[in-house]
Image (cartoon, rainbow, N blue to C red):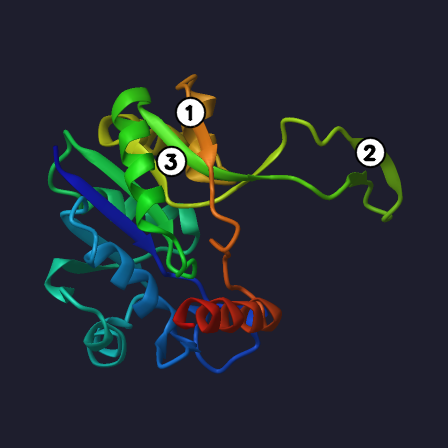
Amino acid sequence: MTVAAVIVAGGKGVRMEHHLRKQYVMLGDRPILSHTLGVFTACDLVHKIIVVIPKGDAGYCKTDVLPHVKNAGKVTMVAGGEERQDSVYFGLKAVEDTDGIVLIHDGVRPFVRMDLIKALIEGAEKEGACIPGAPAFDTLKKVNRFGMIEETAEREGLYLAQTPQAFQYSLIIKAHDAAKNEDFPGTDDASLAERLGFPVRLIQGCPDNIKITTKEDLKLANAILFSRLG
């Protein structure tokens, strides 16, 4: 069975308030995206990595991102689209083995663990679709457009979705094709599969599998990196 990973790194990074796109901001001694790609290139279970980047960024990635990644020969670069969903679709279209498993991951989640990747691949092989999630521990409030609380949501059974999200390729490309044809914007890739009635398994994610989108996230990421380095 062939496993491909689509790493989505096409964002502008406006909330980071940095002169670089968020995926290229330095985390320790290398860009965030280099850390993320390094996890997947080091994973023997993943045979091909497709990184989806903004149009015109291929040269920058060759000189500033990939030199920090071991086994960078496993990486293929693809130009992304206007929205994340478009970029994922372009990445999926670049997958050559359409009978295997595909992992879809945010390029700014550099702390995903190997054991989680393995569990997700096994889950997708068995169930068709498998994603990681973290339970919602804080009290959840629903507010109206005026900022007034309308209700307090029941926390039990609610999870915060993470990536990578793993799918049998035939399932997720069908879900993306349908969303594209019907101009449906999903909140994540699993939501596209759910709307077609495909069952999606959720497994326990990792607390430090954070998405780095703001300056505060970057501070936390540096603390996690420092802790991992001992």
Task: Say what amino acid the circle numbered 3 marks.
Answer: Lys
Measure the alpha-carbon separation of dots 2 and 3: 34 Å
Residue 58 x %, y %: 23, 71
The residue at which mark 2 appears reads as 152
Residue 112 x %, y %: 38, 53
Task: Say what amino acid the circle numbered 2 marks.
Answer: Thr
Labels 1 and 3 touching (C-beta < 8 A): no
Asked if residue 209 is positioned above or below residue 201 in the image, the reply reads below
Closest to the observer, 77 or 145: 77
Query: Circle 3 sits in a helix, a strand or a loop, which is it?
Result: helix
**Image quarter hosting the N terminus:** top left
Q: Residue at x 37, y 59 (%)?
A: 107
Give whichever of discs 2 and 3 has the lower sequence position.
2
Asked if residue 225 is positioned above or below residue 117 in the image, the reply reads below
Image position of 227 (left or right of 30): right
Query: Circle 2 sits in a helix, a strand or a loop, which is it?
Result: strand
Closest to the observer, 185 or 18: 18
Measure the alpha-carbon separation of dots 1 and 3: 20 Å
Task: Say what amino acid the circle numbered 1 marks.
Answer: Val
- Residue found at the far top of this picture: 197
Residue 17 x %, y %: 57, 77
Q: Residue at x 27, y 30 (%)?
A: 122
Q: In the drawing, what numbered circle is on residue 180? A: 3
Q: Residue at x 50, y 63 (%)?
A: 212
What is the crowding at mark 2: few (fewer than 14 residues within 10 Å), some, or many (at least 20)? few
The residue at which mark 1 appears reads as 200
Asked if residue 171 is positioned above or below residue 93 in the image, the reply reads above
Q: Which of label 2 and label 3 is nearer to you?
A: 2
